[in-house]
Amino acid sequence: MNFDEEQRDEIYTAMSNGKRLNPLVKKSWSRSQSYEIKPNASGVTIKYEKEEFEAILKQYTEVLEIIGSYANILLINSLEDNEMIINVFDRKCHLIHQWGNKEYSLTLEKIGLKKGVCWKNKYMGTNGPGEAYLLDKTIIIEGYEHYLINRKGIAQISIPIHDTVGNLFCILDMTIPDKLNVQYYYKALLMVCNGVERELKRMNFIDTNSIKNQCKRSIEDDAFVNEKFIELNQRYLNRRLLLKAIFDQQDIGTAYYSNDGNIILDANDKYRDIVEGVSGTRDIIGKSILKLTNKSWKQKQRIYDFWEKRKETGTKGNLQEVVIPKQGKIKFYNINVEPIKRNNEIMGWVETISDITKIKRVQKKIRERDKLFTDILDRFHIPVALLKYPDLNIKYINKYGNELINKFIGEKLTIKEMQGKTLYELRDINNIDSEVDYMIYRLENKVFLDSKQLDMKLKDKSNVTLKVTDTPLYDDGNLKSVVMAGVDITQELKFLKAKDQFFSIISHELRSPANIIIAASQLLLTDKYREELSLNAISHIEKIKINSYRLLRLINNFLDIQKSEAGYLELTKGNFDIISFSEEITNSITHLTDSKGIEVIFDTEFEEKIISLDIEKYERILLNLLSNATKFTPEGGQIIVNIFQKEDRICISVKDSGIGIAEDKLDKIFEKFTIIDSSLSRVSEGTGLGLNLVKILIEKMDGNIVVNSVEGEGTEFSICLPDKKIKNKDRSSMKRTKKELEHITNIEFSDIN
């Protein structure tokens, strides 16, 4: 029956469940002259009766044996694991035998496609054997999925074989799960057909022109290798190259074993090199590795037990840190063994051996480094712990940290017992709540401490004070761990408290006598007593008063320096007008400078400038600089005090026209007990504490001091303070009485005769 184009399209569409058939399939159906199909007709399954099928099997017994031997070889060496099936159809296109995937065979049987069924009927739809039967040529179908249950994306290759008179003798068919490897299986099936045809020719089953037919078939089949097919072939070649590259790689030894796991069937050079260390030979193909290895190899029994376990269970396994000697050196390897299975039957084993010697060396160095690090941490009297986040599990804790926590919870856990516990578990031990709860709360909420003082009450009722720092550790932005470290400052606080008490006592015990002597001297020099004293006595009392001031100044400077070094020197800041205050201080010394014939000039570019100051400390700074300028400026000299703006700072300069300072002494003048010119000490005494204290006080107020001097011309000290005010605080003032100002001036100028 002949169909017009419209009818034929209906048939193509109906047979593919609404899908357009590919050109090859369309061509095959259009060339079928004896295959009558009506549109929308229901197909009828064609199959042999039982006796008829048994008779056909007898005719093909020898043929099936020949084909079976080749089919099994192809299945064993296929790329796909337990998914492929090979079918043989008789000259009428009835399925007579199958090899390969049983699950797939059962799937076909469920829809009626079992042995004895003809594949050229409508019920079958488009299929390779049916097309090969109708067209009498090789058929390749990609994406064979329109009628099989749960089978999509498969491919089918069908090749006809002819008898001695040129008629169709049988059809060899292969169904594979991966259409990307069609070219590989097509070539493999052609090779099987060649072998089968040679055997059948020898048995006079096929014609003598079989080889010519085979060549003709191969040439004709090239017409079906379109661009898509070429692409698939390239993918297959790339895959083979990849597998070869993996097998031949230089870093990993690879070997293929027989299905019983005893004989080495193939091995790359790296594997041979490794095994040579225990076998003494590289000739290992076709031999048992355990028989080759030396009896003295201590790892031999371990390897034997490992392989026996694999063969017993049929499972893959990994054997780590196997020692294999090489050229007198010890090498470490990891061995991986995995079975290759088809239909749950082991076809062979793949063994890979990786050299981990370098890794072992690195691990050893890491362990040595970790031990050194741990030993160092254990020697410090500092508790350190590493907590895993977010479960707050103790991954590491040092010796002192473990001792401290045991005292805290009232237990005697070892470091190993402590590591692995969580803070939640520690909290529940002996109902320890408050401090641990606080620790858990802040870590859960990522509130980390930075040198914060933390008080802990131990189980024995004693107290410990720590300065705690938390260091969060992140990985790709995610918090992974927290390092907690604390410095036990309990004894330090006790010492500082005692030191503070000591300073208070010293301050009282030293200053009080000096102040009493000064007060007594001043009283004796009043008019009431002066008339009763001789000039010689008055001279001695004056010296007593001056040296008492000097002693008081020394005590003040020494105690302030010690407080600063102990961290107890505090500031009391306010918003002060530095212009008016500086001018007042400068004017307060004129009676002393006038007596030496020194001119004092005060200059400023402001009328008023309010900044944040500790006014008492600033007073001591300015008086100290003025005292130095007066001390080293000869009669007829000049002292200039100038206040000016420099960027975001207010600077105060005290410049004199004195003797100057040698250039090699400039970098030492702020050091403790440094006296610039000892030759002057006979005229102007000093201890070398004044400028050291000046620098300390200025830096305490976030300022800085510099000095410029030319020997024989004079010296200039410049201090710069931040041009800032205390927010939300009114202007402060400090008014001193004439007597108070005179007393302070006398103290700071006490070493000037």
Image (cartoon, rainbow, N blue to C red):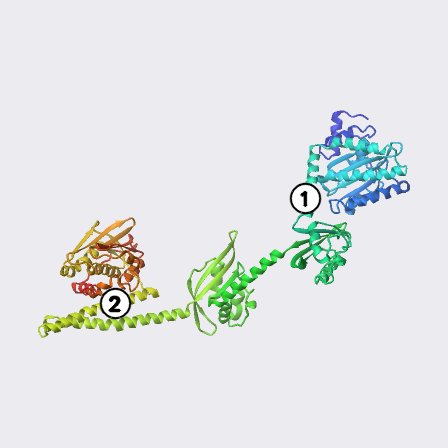
**Whole-percent x, y for residue 674 in the image:** 28, 63
**Seen in the image, is 193 located left or right of residue 727?**
right
Q: Quadrant of the N terminus?
A: top right
Q: Quadrant of the C terminus?
A: bottom left
Give the quarter of the image for residue 415.
Answer: bottom right
Q: Mark 1 belongs to which amino acid?
A: Leu
Q: Is residue 258 above or below residue 152?
A: below
Q: Which residue has dot 2 on it?
A: 554
**Quick one: SS at disc 1?**
helix
**Whole-percent x, y for residue 500 in the image:** 33, 70
Q: Which residue has dot 1 on it?
A: 242
Q: Mark 2 belongs to which amino acid?
A: Leu
Question: Of 424 and 314, which appears nearest the observer?
Answer: 314
Number of callouts: 2
Question: Of 178 and 55, which appears nearest the observer?
Answer: 178
**Quick one: SS at disc 2?**
helix
Local crowd size for mark 1, using a 10 Å CA cut-off: few (<14), some (14–19), many (≥20): few
Whether residue 50 can be seen here = no
Q: In this view, does 189 lie above or below 2?
A: below
**Seen in the image, is 29 located left or right of residue 668?**
right
Mark 1 vs 2, N-terminal side: 1
C-alpha separation, residue under disc 1 versus residue under disc 2: 87 Å
